[in-house]
Image (cartoon, grey):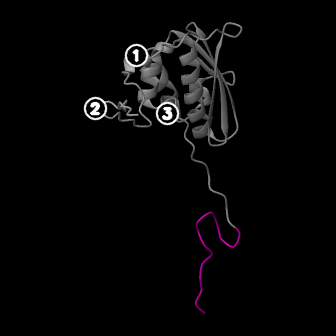
Amino acid sequence: MTEEITSTESAEPETITLGEAPAETAEDTFVPREPAAPVHGWWWGTGRRKASVARVRVQPGSAGVLCNGKPLEEFFCTPRDRNNVMAVLEATNMLGQVSVKANLTGGGTTGQSGAMVMGLARALLGYDPSVEAVLREHGFLSRDARRVERKKYGQRGARRRFQFSKR
């Protein structure tokens, strides 16, 4: 009884590597955002910075920017804070095309302006998704996670120690 054994192995062994995904380009995977539906005619965006929270509404129009019912120039006294908010509208070329209303709570003026920048950017993203690349490029959609470090017991502050006396 002689049986012939035939080999089922191919001449070239298969190489299997784990973790490889099919090669796709960025153009194949990009799906454009659909414009968000307005809530009662407004597009909303929420921004936070330090202890401040800004709830920002945007709609088509040219009524300007209102913060807690006041014009931007009255609410933010320092030019730096005003310019931070206006930079979002200027970068997206929406200045004079949208009406902005913001409710700002907590923190100080710098934190509130930073929160408003993020809230305004998110609201504009819902209003016109084509501006996402510009907003990301300028960093308007990035949350600044820095906060005040707490004071530690046995010290004068967060890092500062009590004065040391040798004698």
The residue under label 3 is which amino acid type? Answer: Pro
Crowding around mark 1 (Cα neighbors within 10 Å: few <14, some 14 to 19, many 20+) is few
Secondary structure under tag 2 reads loop
**Residue under the image location 46 percent in, 17 percent down:** 131
Q: Mark 1 points at which residue?
A: 28
Residue that protrudes farthest toward the front in the picture: 1
Is residue 162 magenta-colored? Answer: yes
Q: Mark 3 points at which residue?
A: 79
2 vs 3, front mark: 2
- Which quadrant is home to the C terminus? bottom right
Image location (x, y in percent) of residue 133? 43, 21
Q: Mark 2 points at which residue?
A: 11
Secondary structure under tag 3 reads helix
Judge from the rendering whether residue 40 lies leftward or rightward of residue 17; answer left or right: right
Q: Give the extent of the magenta segment.
A: 153-167
Camera sees residue 95: no
Separation of disc 2 and disc 1 at Cα?
36 Å
Separation of disc 3 and disc 1 at Cα?
44 Å
Q: Nearest the camera: 24 or 79? A: 24
**Residue under the image location 49 percent in, 33 percent down:** 79
The residue under label 2 is which amino acid type? Answer: Ala
The residue under label 1 is which amino acid type? Answer: Asp
